[in-house]
Image (spheres, coloured by chain):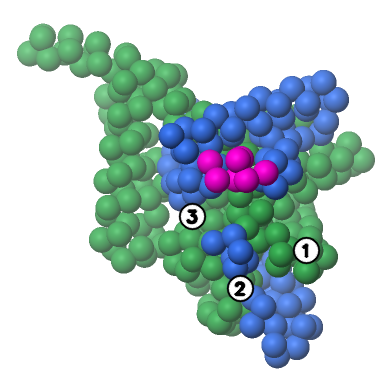
Chain colours: A green, B blue
């Protein structure tokens, strides 16, 4: 028994533990998601986060210990943001022909998401650091962290808000679009995908990609545009207010 | 080897982005500048062929990359207990507003093209596939 305890103490303190746990739990969550016919409630990010957080709490493992291994996955967010140029490049012809419309939808949609978040948070009397951390919640986590830092929010909190926002979008997008009577023809998939990429960043885009390849492509485009617009405009808006 | 070259390009451009963002005090995070640099560099087939493989892999598994940050929610349980309900209301409602406004607006903008719009609404340009 003591041997086992010692082995656990050793293993759980090496980076190997956090990395292995993250990957194994995610692969299982992904398999579960596939098994449930990709039902929105079976979202793999949601269940991975819940399982890992519960497991760490149950075993008394501190988050920094876990993160010492998980950071290798976390690190890839940077190169992934750079890689977003690829879907933009692939759609450059559609973009060039209609860039004004995509830009307008991205600008108004992003402003609606960030503006309603800040306005509501303010109205509900949340502390100012939380309000500021909510502003960049529609952009992908690493960018949200950078923006939050710039405007006086809490980067770690901004990242969590971004992840939760992505999950809300991935979980409820389908029902909202159905209720708004957005069709599932080519224009409908474009609107659905683009909206998910704009308001629910990478997690919404991942969901769009699983449901429909075209929707996923538009989501990636929207995500890239939102990253550029939000990181430019949110700090600017914060400075003016 | 292609994928490895592509990954090297991503890291080089991210580093260049970080450097430029700091030196010129740009309002963008480093990786965003790297993304813009890559968009320019993709004109060059040497970059394009190697980046394509790794970019599709990374972006296909994008949601995995959010898990480590998401688990960090356990370190903010106190804050969640105090403000959790209000934060949840804000996040859910503002996400719906963002999704609804974007989808309805884009659909309205695209419909101005007339009935042949759907024919052009192809996600991937033929020459890139």
**Residue A144 point in image, percent of width and height:** 66, 38
Between circles 1 and 3, the one closer to the viewer is 1
Image mark for residue A175: none
- In the structure shown, which secondary structural element does the residue marked by tag 1 occupy? helix
- SS assignment for the magenta stretch, majority: helix
Q: In which quadrant will I find the N terminus of chain A?
A: top left
Are dots 1 and 3 on a single chain? yes
Kindly give the residue lying farthest to the right in the view shown.
A240
Q: Distance between the residues labelled 2 and 3?
A: 19 Å
**Residue A225 point in image, percent of width and height:** 71, 52
Image mark for residue A96: 1
Q: Name the quadrant containing residue B92.
A: bottom right
Are dots 2 and 1 on a single chain? no
Disc 1 crowd rating (10 Å Cα; few below 14, some 14-19, many 20+) is few
Image mark for residue B122: 2
In percent of the image, x 82 and y 38: which residue is there? A235
Q: Is residue A37 above or below residue A151?
A: below
Q: Which of B13 and A219 is in front in this view?
A: B13
Q: Distance between the residues labelled 1 and 3?
A: 25 Å
In percent of the image, x 25 and y 16: which residue is there? A11
Q: Does the magenta stretch include residue B45?
A: yes
Q: Is residue B10 visible?
A: yes
């Amino acid at each position: 028994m003591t041997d086992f305890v010692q082995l656990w103490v050793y293993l759980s303190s090496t980076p190997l533990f956090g990395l292995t746990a993250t990957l194994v739990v995610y692969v299982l969550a992904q398999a579960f998601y596939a098994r449930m016919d990709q039902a929105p409630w079976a979202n793999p990010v949601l269940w991975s986060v819940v399982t890992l957080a519960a497991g760490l709490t149950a075993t008394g493992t501190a988050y920094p210990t876990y993160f010492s291994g998980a950071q290798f996955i976390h690190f890839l967010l940077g190169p992934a943001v750079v890689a977003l140029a690829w879907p933009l490049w692939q759609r450059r012809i559609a973009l060039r022909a209609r860039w004004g419309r995509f830009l307008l939808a991205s600008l108004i949609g992003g402003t609606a998401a960030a503006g309603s978040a800040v306005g509501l948070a303010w109205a509900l009397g949340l502390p100012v650091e939380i309000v500021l951390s909510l502003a960049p919640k529609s952009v992908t986590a690493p960018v949200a962290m950078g923006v939050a830092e710039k405007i006086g929010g809490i980067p770690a909190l901004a990242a969590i808000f971004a992840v939760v926002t992505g999950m809300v979008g991935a979980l409820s997008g389908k029902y909202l679009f159905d209720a708004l009577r957005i069709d599932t023809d080519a224009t409908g998939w474009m609107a659905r995908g683009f909206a998910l990429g704009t308001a629910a960043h990478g997690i919404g885009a991942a969901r769009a990609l699983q449901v429909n390849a075209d929707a996923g492509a538009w989501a990636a485009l929207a995500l890239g545009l939102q990253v550029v617009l939000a990181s430019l405009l949110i700090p600017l808006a914060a400075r003016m207010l | 080897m292609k994928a490895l070259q592509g990954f090297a390009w991503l890291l080089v451009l991210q580093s260049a982005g970080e450097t430029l963002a700091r030196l010129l005090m740009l309002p963008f995070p480093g990786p965003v500048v790297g993304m813009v640099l890559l968009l320019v560099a993709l004109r060059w087939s040497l970059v394009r062929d190697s980046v394509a493989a790794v970019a599709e892999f990374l972006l296909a598994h994008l949601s995995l990359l959010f898990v480590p940050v998401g688990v960090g929610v356990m370190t903010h349980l106190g804050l969640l207990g105090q403000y959790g309900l209000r934060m949840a209301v804000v996040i859910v409602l503002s996400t719906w507003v963002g999704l609804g406004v974007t989808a309805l607006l884009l659909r309205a903008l695209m419909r101005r093209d007339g009935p042949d719009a759907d024919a052009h609404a192809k996600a991937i340009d033929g020459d890139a596939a």
